[in-house]
Amino acid sequence: MPTSARDPYRSLTRVAGTAGLRVIRLNDARHDCATLLTAAGTAPCVVMEILGHSQIAVATNIHAHAGQDTRREGVSLLDRMPGRHRPDRG
């Protein structure tokens, strides 16, 4: 029996409704998945494979966006680098 392109969304809606969860678009779920995997330190090639992309750039540039905490952590790592010039704050 052929399936409709909307069948996965209908299934998600049904499962979410049964579980009492808010329904989101499937693409939003993919985006959230990529973002969470990236924030957890998952290698970009693994994120790419999980999402089914053919290139790492798609997974890293389109789906995964660093959250505010991740950006702060990155800047903090730079600040702690040996030899980093720190201006006087006095």
Image (tube, rainbow, N blue to C red):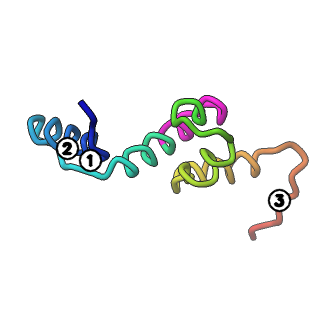
Main SS, magenta region, reads: helix
Residue 74 at x, y percent in the picture: 67, 49
Q: Amino acid at mark 1?
A: Arg
Q: Residue furthest right?
A: 83
Q: What residue is pinned by disc 3?
A: 86
Task: Answer whether labels 1 and 3 touch (C-beta < 8 Å).
Answer: no
- Left or right position of 52 against 87: left
Residue 9 versus residue 34: which sits nearer the camera?
9
The spot of residue 9 in percent (x, y) is 26, 45
Secondary structure of the residue carrying numbered label 2: helix
Q: Quadrant of the C terminus?
A: bottom right
Question: What amino acid is found at the position of numbered circle 3 in the picture?
Answer: Arg
Lower position in the chain sequence, tag 1 or tag 3? 1
- Name the residue that disc number 1 marks: 6
Mark 2 vs mark 1, foreground winner is 1
The extreme front residue here reads 1
Which element carries disc 3, helix, strand or loop?
A: loop
The boundaries of the magenta stretch are 36-46
| Mark 2 touches mark 3? (CB < 8 Å) | no
